Image (tube, grey):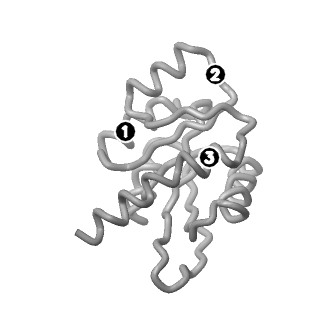
Amino acid sequence: MSTRREPAEGAAETRIVVVDTHHDRRQLMRYVLDLGSGQHASVSFADGPDSAVAAVERVDAHAALVEVQLPLEDGLETVRRLREAAPKLRIVVCSFRSDPPTVAMALSLGADDYLRKPLRPVELYQSLQAPAAAHAAKEHS
């Protein structure tokens, strides 16, 4: 399931995959992304490593927002598999879990950033801003 808004003429659309098993948190993330990112965003959802990789490939995502506390399959495994499948993908972990070993492991497995929940929307937007511009430049070269 995705939310698609048409980009303004000349504006780049940011394609984001949100990986979380909790429906309410996914909807909240969609709301935050739609509300204030200042970018035209298409948001897709996944609930584990297999569906995350499939969603990233299906929509040619610019970024993935991953919760590391996934009940069925570990979010750290999701980070590892996404990095392996999509080396240029921006991977941002967004989690309530913030113990130093988990943060270090996520970054060592390929996460580009680790944001602690509750999220400050401005931090999320800043974390997503640079990769969208880089991906758009890559697509036009």
What residue is shown with label 3?
Answer: 124
Residue lying furthest bottom in this view? Answer: 9
Please tell me whether mark 2 sits on a helix, a strand or a loop.
Answer: loop
In this picture, residue 87 sits left or right of residue 42: left
Q: Position of residue 75 (x, y in %)?
A: 52, 33
Q: Label 1 amino acid?
A: Arg
- Residue at 30% from the left image edge and 40% from the top image edge: 84
What residue is shown with label 1?
Answer: 81
Residues at badges 2 and 3 in contact (C-beta under 8 Å)? no
Q: Dot 2, how many residues are within 10 Å of its Cα: few (below 14), some (14-19), or many (20+)?
A: some
Q: Label 2 amino acid?
A: Ser
Q: Earlier in the sequence, mark 2 or mark 1?
A: 1
Location of residue 35 with respect to 21 vertically, above or below: below
Q: Position of residue 140 (x, y in %)?
A: 28, 72
Q: What quarter of the picture does the N terminus occupy?
A: bottom right
When asked about the image quadrant of residue 20, the answer is top right
Residue 98's tag is: 2
Q: Earlier in the sequence, mark 1 or mark 3?
A: 1
When asked about the image quadrant of residue 37, the answer is bottom right
